Image (cartoon, helix red, strand yellow):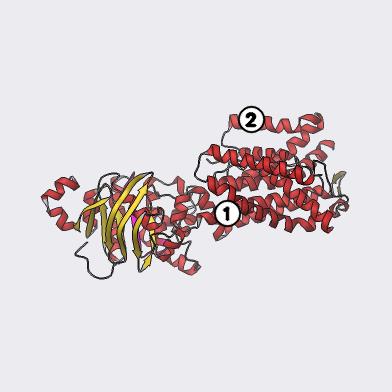
Amino acid sequence: MVVTQVLVSGLLVGGIYALVAIGLTLIWGILDVINFAHGSYVMVGMYVAYFAWSLLGLDPLAALPFDAVILGAAGYLTYRFVIRPVMGKSALSQIVITFGLLMLLEGGAEVLWTPNSRGVPNPVSSHLNVHLGGIVLGGPQLVGFVGAILFTLVLAGFINFTRTGNALRATGEDRMGAAVMGINVERMNTLAWVLGLACTGIAGALLMNTYTVDPQAGVTFGLIAFIAVALGGFGSVLGAGIAGLLLGMVQSLVSLYASQYGLAALVGLFLVVILVRPTGILGVR
Amino acid sequence: MTGVGGPSLLAVRDLYLDYAGAVALGGVDLDVLPGEAVALVGANGAGKSSLLAAVAGLHRPVRGSIVFDGHEVGRLAPHRIIPLGIALVPEGRRLFPHLSVRRNLLLGAYHRRSRAEQEEQLDVVFDLFPFLKERLRQRAGTLSGGEQQMVALARALLGRPRLLMLDELSLGVAPMVVSRMFEVLARIRDSGMTILLVEQKLQLAMEFASRAYILQTGRVVLSGSTAELLASEDVRRAYLGV
């Protein structure tokens, strides 16, 4: 029973990992750029939800749409002013610039908002605990999971079944081929960043139901998202989603027996998969 | 440029283009009239592909103008040019390998929003390439080279272009398939499509087109009807190698 409870809790956290990872894989898949600052945007998304509560009295769930819009706008600005200048440049300069973003966001958060942890006490979702045959599904976690999965499905539907979604995929497959189809490749790049970071905004709002935020809060999420993307196969939305859920469960299970080693286990799993199957679980490249 | 009467569908004037730091085109003039098939020939690196890429907006010219159907397109981005009625089958096909054949085809009509128009054009393309019907759900990357080339051609036709540009269609495709493909192309040409093609296989290009331009290191050295060019012993020896 304990194991089941732990696995279920892990699955719930995994939903959020999946959402964050999908944002990362989207950006990677369309632009071939790894956003090392991805976790930092989750942190920013958490702060947005925190301030929506502390300044405006909004519950994290009510702040969610705003969080998505604000981080989506951050995605637009980031692409336009930071990423676009290094498109077509060496992979190293792209790595350095997104890593620089990470430092900037974390440093900026420390200066602006101090290193103290902040949390939203008593969010609406904390009254939504569900008891299911001896297993407790924590309200905030449950809401986070359902929200993450819903948004993931909407995003997957958009990418797979709309004209613009197809153009987005085409751009990821072959930029020049897409340009020749009359697809505005620049706009697709921008859209990938907007959607990718909107994911972090939503994740940030959902996380504020459970977690506290501090300037380093995003580091773990960034790392886990990166592992999920690698496991799922770079650029694969479905793969990143499944890997996110799996990582949540593995972390939760390992933490049960060796509480310090949850994250280490994920990195270990990452190494094993990379050695055995470098293209990831569902990888096609 | 002389000997071309009537308004050109495509008029290139004094076009200069740099590519990777080198001069790719150094003052090219070229006309394509509505309904004709024109070949660009010349050695590797003569600038043939660069010219097609410039017309499609993939490369920005340093100087000169490209006028398509009365619109100056020389400095527009591809997504503004393609909807005017230009399609390019690029070298190396540039299919979307993990997307289905159907999605690849429909992306060819990306700039045409009308669903009915897309379906109608799909039927036209199935008529030209019947094998496509059975392959619609297959990933484009799993097709043979020849089949992929035909998908690329079909995809270009889906946008109902008024100018069809073909870059090295025969590259990496079995000779049998090339001749089948050119049979289909001849049907497309005879239906009134305006075609500008770059082709490594000279004999093929010269037989297919009615006029040709011979490019050498970024300049047009000769142009005229393919019959004239082929008839001249000097031209054949110096430029055509046939």
Left or right: B6 with respect to A273? left
The residue at 45%/62% (across/down) is B80
Image coordinates of residue B233 in percent, x first then y, are 11, 50
Circle 1: element type? helix
Query: Callout 2, which amino acid?
Result: Leu
Image coordinates of residue B228 in percent, x first then y, are 15, 57
Marks 1 and 2: which is nearer the front?
Answer: 1
Residue A62 counted in the magenta span = no
Q: Do the residues at pointers 1 and 2 share their chain?
A: yes
Mark 2 burial class by Cα count in 10 Å: few <14, some 14-19, many 20+: some
Q: Which mark is residue A271?
A: 2
Left or right: B15 with respect to A30? left
- The magenta stretch is B158-172
Q: Quadrant of residue A181?
A: bottom left
Residue situated furthest left in the rendering: B233
Q: Which mark is residue A190?
A: 1
Circle 2: element type? helix
Left or right: B3 with respect to A200? left
Left or right: B225 with respect to B9? left
Q: Chain of mark 2?
A: A
Task: Give the CA separation, mark 1 to mark 2.
Answer: 32 Å
Mark 1 burial class by Cα count in 10 Å: few <14, some 14-19, many 20+: many
Residue B164 counted in the magenta span = yes
Image coordinates of residue B93 in percent, x first then y, are 40, 49
Identify the main secondary structure in magenta: loop
